[in-house]
Amino acid sequence: MYFPSDLSVDLPLIDVDVFLSGSANSDIIYQECKKAAHALIVYGALVLHDSRVSEDDNSTFLDLLEDYFNQPQENLKKDERPELSYQVGVTLENTEKPKCAVDEPCLRIIERLDPLERPLDITAHSPDPKCRFFWKMTEKPPYETQFPGLNAPNVVPQAEHIEKRWMPAMEQWGKAMKSAVSDLTEMIALGLDLPQQTFKDAGRYGPHLLAPTASDLAKYGTKDTILAGFHSDLNFLTIHGRSRYPGLHIWARNTGKRIPVKIPPGNNLLVQAGKQLEHITGGLIKAGFHEVVVNEKTIETIERRKIEFPDRPLIRISSTFFWHLSSDYDLVPIPSLVARVHTLRAENLTIGKDEEEILYNPVKVGQQVSK
């Protein structure tokens, strides 16, 4: 299988409802699973339809996070946990740095892109002006983990107008996203001709995170401001709900195209492959790159919301969930998938396409995410 150069920028839509409608032995369900795996191999991303995902729940979540990040800085700082490397609670603006800015393999990926399709320049980019909140959505393992810092208890904000709303909204939206992406891991496994529970079992005790980011567009609303610099994610799968403000761009594998993301209205989510999925598949599936910037559509939305919602803060919330493999899991490429990588690379070489060969050494997941 080679990658055509004229891939559509419309990402494949995968339907979880089909998967949940019957037996995994059904040909219709198997073909939907093959479609999911193929989408991640070719694009590194897909749109996921799940009727259990409610737009109302997403709106409630976005309202809560806008109100939370609209608090004074001194209130937010109470929820920081730098001693735990910000693995729970809030991370304030200008703390996170895009790793790609100092990562040579990542910079080489940018260099290979057409200049018109490259991300905004991150080589001189300071830490991202976004804030973040990490809310764990984990199942406690029945053993003592080697990585307790990755499994620390959640932080609940104490402000009265936030606290009562916090747990219900975070758990409702977080569980919906977690269910969707957990079912997708089964679909991907079947689509790769692996046992259905391969990835789901490996991630049962993972430090899954509901991880919204917040960007103050009243401060950082100038065109071409980088809110989150070009990067890929360390986890297994990243799932995004609809944001109220455009600005997310992704790069589908081998297209070389910078794609503005538009999640279709309704019960739909965006899913991108992360580094853990890349590692365990031996590079058959590559982690997807993305950035968040202020573009013309962002500015148009800012001006429209000033009129339509004059009392709401101009804060861009990303509705993001990170699905992880378990911290103590041994991350090793699956041999049958490594064999497919060699075949794929040979096919691509015949049409003049090549990707840098990467060695995926065995590592504990907890070590992989702590690098």
Image (cartoon, helix red, strand yellow):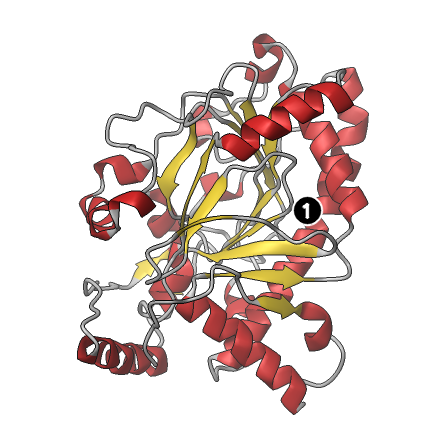
The residue drawn where x is 22% and y is 65% is 355
Quarter of the image with the C terminus is top left
> Which of 76 and 306 lies nearest the eye of the viewer?
306
Quarter holding the N terminus? bottom left
Front-lying residue, 36 or 334: 36
Residue 51: quadrant of the picture:
bottom right
Query: Of helix, strand and loop, which one carries label 1?
Result: helix
Relative to residue 71, is residue 219 drawn left or right? left
The residue pinned by badge 1 equals: 174
Count of numbered badges drawn on the protein = 1
Residue under the point 65% across and 44% down: 242
Q: Where residue 343 sits: x, y (%)?
A: 26, 83
Image location of residue 298, percent across then percent down? 55, 31
> Residue 186: where, in percent of width, then height?
58, 72
In the rendered view, would you say 65 is above or below 274? above
Asked whether residue 175 is in view, the answer is yes
* Residue 134 on image: x %, y %: 56, 36
Alpha-carbon neighbours of circle 1 within 10 Å: few (<14), some, or many (≥20)? Answer: many
In this picture, residue 369 sits left or right of residue 52: left
Q: Nearer the viewer, residue 353 or 90?
A: 353
Q: Amino acid at mark 1?
A: Gly
Give the residue displayed 81% in from the left and 26% down from the top.
164
Q: Nearer the viewer, residue 271 or 337?
A: 271
Q: Residue at x 38, y 56 (%)?
A: 275
| Residue 331 in view here | no
